[in-house]
């Protein structure tokens, strides 16, 4: 093995997803020399956008929440040119379309609440109001310290009926957790619910990839090396596939759970969830509002007309529709989906053009209770691991874990600048 001359730095960060970008950014701001090595051709990890024939295709449907503390702290929101979803969601049920809205946002929305009678009685509305008020207004520390159980149990304990769970929470949260048993940590649910009530669900005009793009653009020149996969960690740093070594006293693995387990044998990583997003194009929007649509029969996780949220997602004369399902899709899935979408949108979907079907394996870590919301990133002397799998499967979790890795690196160096 040879050392690439001039390739010695204070910290090597492996992986330029949100966690690696946050970590590298914080370490650079602290005055350290940092090398951020990314295997693929661009930064972003699981948050990337492809441009095709005038469409913006995110690598799996996802939304950007403006109220995450890490987002507020480190992102320049105006620069993202955010386009908002309508707060809440439309639910397709056998008895028609219901609108779940946030009464604190839209005047007159109480009328919508009356339309929820098929799935939510008066007691449910009261229980939902109490749960939401506590999550919205209570101290975040209390939510973080609350007893952790499954979201299903937490909703039942909050007095939400099975009708409302099955008619709204299960179909809605399946698209957030990427699992349909509501097995996910209730602490994570309460934090997500709080952030939904406090913030706005958006898409950047240039696609979801603009989020990591902004963080990557703020790094000093020369920090980020794309197309640079790390093969292994060595005593002195890391080894690249061509056998060259790069040396640094500290190495932070921000490579996602599967790669982290390969690079750090013995590291325990969680199971992960898989999702497939179908992108269809059509000449007329089947729904003329920027609203998420879910299906009480759960034939899919969610669907929406992306170009109604952000017109930049499609050419002027076209509409872009995103629909996600759990798992890998599979043969016949798209045909089946077209039938369900025809019913849900009340539109003829036979002429819709399938632009792409994106399966994202390892989209999110599974987060069963008890799920620690944040873990130390220290795994050995000078070795750290961060990413959403060490916190929560979210933009907030990935950024917070990257920030924690930077803090722990700095603390271990005793705040020294320059070579340790
Ligand atoms: C379809 C989908 C929908 C989502 N929806 C939402 C949502 O609505 N709201 C929300 O808050 N969050 C959502 N998320 C979660 C969020 O996107 C992730 O939690 C976050 O992007 C994870 O960032 P990360 O840095 O931890 O990992 P990653 O993004 O996985 O980054 C790891 C990086 O390491 C690189 N790498 C791997 N191995 C190596 C190696 N050997 N050498 C060098 N580089 C390497 C990879 O190429 C990658 O760039 C969603 C995720 C997906 C996939």
Image (cartoon, rainbow, N blue to C red):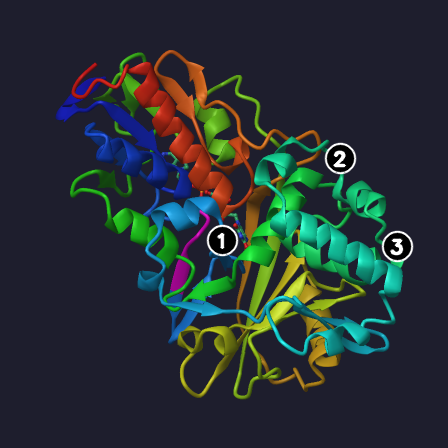
Q: Residues within 10 Å of mark 2 (few under 14, many from 20)?
A: some
Position of the C terminus, as image quadrant, is top left
Q: Are marks 3 and 1 in contact (CB under 8 Å)?
A: no
- Position of 268 with respect to 225 (left or right) is right
Residue 48 among magenta residues: yes
Circle 2 residue: 149
Q: Tell me the distance, in whole angstroms, between the alpha carbons under discs 2 and 3.
A: 17 Å
The x, y position of residue 237, in whole percent, is 28, 19
User: Looking at this view, is 237 or 23 the one in front?
Assistant: 23
Front position among marks 1 and 2: 1
Asked if residue 5 can be seen in this view, the reply is yes
Secondary structure of the magenta portion, mostly?
A: loop
Residue plotted at (88% across, 55% down):
161
Q: Tell me the distance, in whole angstroms, between the alpha carbons under discs 1 and 2.
A: 24 Å
Residue 294 among magenta residues: no
Circle 1 residue: 67
Element assignment for label 3: helix
User: Looking at this view, is 134 or 169 the one in front?
Assistant: 134
* Looking at the image, residue 266 lies above or below residue 17: above
The x, y position of residue 320, in whole percent, is 51, 76
Quarter of the image for residue 109 reads bottom right
Element assignment for label 1: loop
* Looking at the image, residue 232 lies above or below residue 44: above
Circle 3 residue: 162
């Amino acid at each position: 093995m040879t050392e690439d001359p001039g390739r010695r730095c204070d910290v090597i960060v492996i992986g330029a997803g949100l966690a690696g970008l946050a970590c590298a950014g914080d370490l650079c701001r602290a005055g350290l020399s940092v090398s951020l090595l990314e295997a693929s051709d661009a930064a972003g990890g699981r948050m990337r956008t492809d441009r095709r024939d005038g469409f913006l295709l995110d690598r799996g449907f996802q939304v950007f929440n403006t109220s995450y503390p890490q987002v507020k702290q480190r992102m320049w929101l105006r620069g993202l040119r955010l386009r908002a979803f309508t707060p809440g969601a439309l639910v397709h049920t056998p008895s028609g379309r219901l609108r779940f809205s946030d009464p604190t946002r839209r005047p007159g929305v109480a009328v919508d609440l009356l339309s929820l009678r098929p799935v939510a009685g008066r007691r449910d509305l009261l229980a939902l109001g109490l749960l939401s008020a506590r999550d919205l207004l209570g101290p975040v520390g209390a939510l973080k310290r609350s007893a952790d159980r499954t979201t299903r149990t937490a909703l039942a304990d909050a007095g939400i009926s099975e009708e409302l769970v099955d008619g709204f929470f299960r179909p809605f949260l399946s698209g957030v957790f990427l699992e349909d048993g509501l097995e996910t940590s209730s602490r994570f649910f309460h934090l997500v619910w709080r952030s939904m009530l406090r913030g706005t669900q958006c898409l950047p005009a240039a696609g979801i990839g603009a989020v990591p793009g902004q963080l990557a653009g703020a790094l000093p020149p020369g920090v980020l090396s794309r197309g640079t996969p790390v093969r292994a960690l060595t005593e002195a740093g890391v080894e690249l596939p061509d056998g060259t070594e790069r040396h640094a006293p500290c190495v932070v693995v921000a490579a996602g759970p599967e790669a982290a387990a390969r690079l750090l044998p013995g590291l325990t990583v969680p199971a992960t969830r898989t999702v497939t997003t179908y992108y269809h194009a059509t000449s007329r929007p089947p729904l003329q509002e920027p609203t998420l649509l879910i299906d009480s029969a759960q034939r899919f996780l969610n669907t929406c007309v992306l170009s109604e949220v952000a017109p930049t997602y499609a050419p002027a004369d076209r509409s872009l529709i995103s629909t996600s399902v759990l798992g890998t899709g599979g043969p016949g899935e798209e045909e089946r989906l077209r039938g369900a979408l025809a019913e849900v949108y009340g539109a003829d979907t036979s002429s819709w053009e399938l632009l792409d079907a994106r399966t994202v394996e390892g989209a999110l870590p599974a987060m069963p209770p008890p799920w620690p919301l944040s873990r130390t990133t220290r795994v050995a002397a000078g070795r750290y691991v961060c990413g959403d799998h060490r916190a929560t499967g979210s933009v907030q979790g990935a950024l917070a874990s990257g920030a924690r890795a930077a803090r722990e690196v700095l603390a271990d160096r005793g705040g020294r600048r320059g070579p340790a």
